[in-house]
Amino acid sequence: VVVGARDSGRLYADLEAADARWTVIRAAFVLSSGERLPLAGERPPALEAEAVPVRH
């Protein structure tokens, strides 16, 4: 999937460094229109409303 190939948006990421490794905590691409597209670490609002609890 190519996100923002024709858009001048920005990629934002929260990273954590530990043991000489980087881990992505959250990442999102923000389009020039201001629309935010979550990429990692968070669920899109539409999916959050449909979330079903997992029972163990």
Image: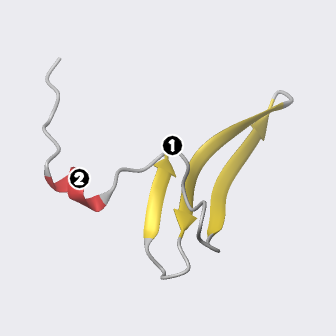
Apparent side of residue 25 relative to residue 17 in the rendered image (left or right)? left
Secondary structure, mark 1, is loop
Per the image, the residue denoted by label 2 is 48
The three-letter code of the residue at mark 2 reads Glu
Residue 9 vertical position relative to residue 47 in the rendered view, above or below:
below
Residue 13 vertical position relative to residue 41 in the rendered view, above or below:
below
Numbered label attached to residue 32 = none
- In the rendered image, residue 19, in percent from the top left (x then y), is placed at 82, 27
Q: Quadrant of residue 10?
A: bottom right
Residue found at the very far top of the displayed protein? 56
Label 2 or label 1, whichever lies nearer to me, is: 1
Residue 46 vertical position relative to residue 22 in the rendered view, above or below:
below
- In the rendered image, residue 45, in percent from the top left (x then y), is placed at 28, 60
Q: Which callout, 2 or 1, points at the residue further toward the start of the chain?
A: 1
Per the image, the residue denoted by label 1 is 1
The residue under the point 23% across, 53% down is 48
Q: Quadrant of residue 14?
A: bottom right
- What is the C-alpha distance between the residues marked 2 and 1? 22 Å
Secondary structure, mark 2, is helix
Can you say which quadrant of the picture contains the C terminus?
top left
Q: Nearer the viewer, residue 2 or 39?
A: 2
Label 1 neighbour load within 10 Å: few <14, some 14-19, many 20+: few
Which colour scheme appears in the figure?
Answer: secondary structure
- In the rendered image, residue 23, in percent from the top left (x then y), is placed at 68, 37
The residue under the point 42% across, 50% down is 42
Label 2 neighbour load within 10 Å: few <14, some 14-19, many 20+: few
The residue under the point 43% across, 74% down is 35
Apparent side of residue 8 relative to residue 46 in the rendered image (left or right)? right
- In the rendered image, residue 27, in percent from the top left (x then y), is placed at 57, 53
The three-letter code of the residue at mark 1 reads Val
